[in-house]
Image: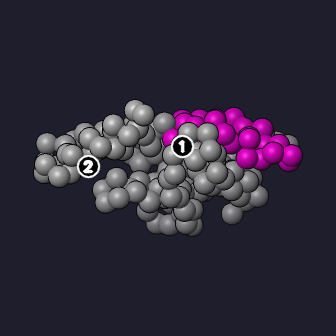
Amino acid sequence: MEPVTQVVQQGLLHYFERVCPSEHGIQIPVQSPEPGEEHPDADCVLEFDLPGSLSTQAQLTVRHEKGNVCEVAGALGEGPPKHFSVCLSAESPHQSVKKIGAFLLAELQRVVGKRLLRRIPEMGAADRDALEDLLVLEKE
């Protein structure tokens, strides 16, 4: 793995492990396995370990431009990629990728919400009550 890819990867892992819980109150289990045959063009993969069919992956391609600048394209699941130009700071590499993390978090919320909404008609009464309890707690 290229050094700039490692910096992006570590910054995004930090974003989901530390920034999301402290700034957004959201804890999302995430891992970064080596890209395999499933994503041959990806330089970095993030796996979001969510219950059942809600689990998904983000694929990132990282291209070093010059100096401390790199171009990153990131997509969640089969969604369209978004392109970022990132200036990696030696002092705070985690801050450099914060906008990529924010994009992936927003996409994750959108995709998970959409999948959850599709499943509501199939849910039994207990599952619906549990979901309602979660949503009520979220409002408080």
- For residue 137, above or below residue 123: above
Q: Which mark is residue 125?
A: none
- For residue 48, above or below residue 93: below
- For residue 109, above or below residue 53: above
Is any part of residue 61 visible from this angle? no
| Residue at 77% in and 47% down | 93
| Residue at 57% in and 67% down | 34
Question: How far across and how far down the image is residue 70, in percent?
Answer: 73, 42
| Residue at 76% in and 58% down | 3
Is-magenta flag for residue 95?
A: yes
Q: Nearer the viewer, residue 127 or 61?
A: 127
Determine whether the residue tagged by mark 1 lies in a helix, strand or loop. loop
Question: How far across and how far down the image is residue 20, in percent?
Answer: 58, 45
| Residue at 64% in and 36% down | 99
**Quadrant location of the C terminus?**
top left
Q: What is the crowding at mark 1: few (fewer than 14 residues within 10 Å), some, or many (at least 20)?
A: few
Q: Nearer the viewer, residue 74 or 91?
A: 91
Rendering quarter of residue 86: top right
Q: Which mark is residue 130?
A: 2
Q: Earlier in the sequence, mark 2 or mark 1?
A: 1
Is-magenta flag for residue 99?
A: yes
Q: Nearer the viewer, residue 75 or 111?
A: 111
How does the figure colour the protein chain or chains?
one colour
Rendering quarter of residue 98: top right
Between the C-alphas of marks 2 and 1, the distance is: 20 Å
Highlighted range, magenta = 81-105
- Position of 139 with respect to 8 (left or right) is left
Task: Return the residue at label 1.
Answer: 25
Number of numbered discs overlaid on the protein picture: 2
Question: How far across and how far down the image is residue 41, in percent?
Answer: 53, 55
At label 2, the amino acid type is Ala
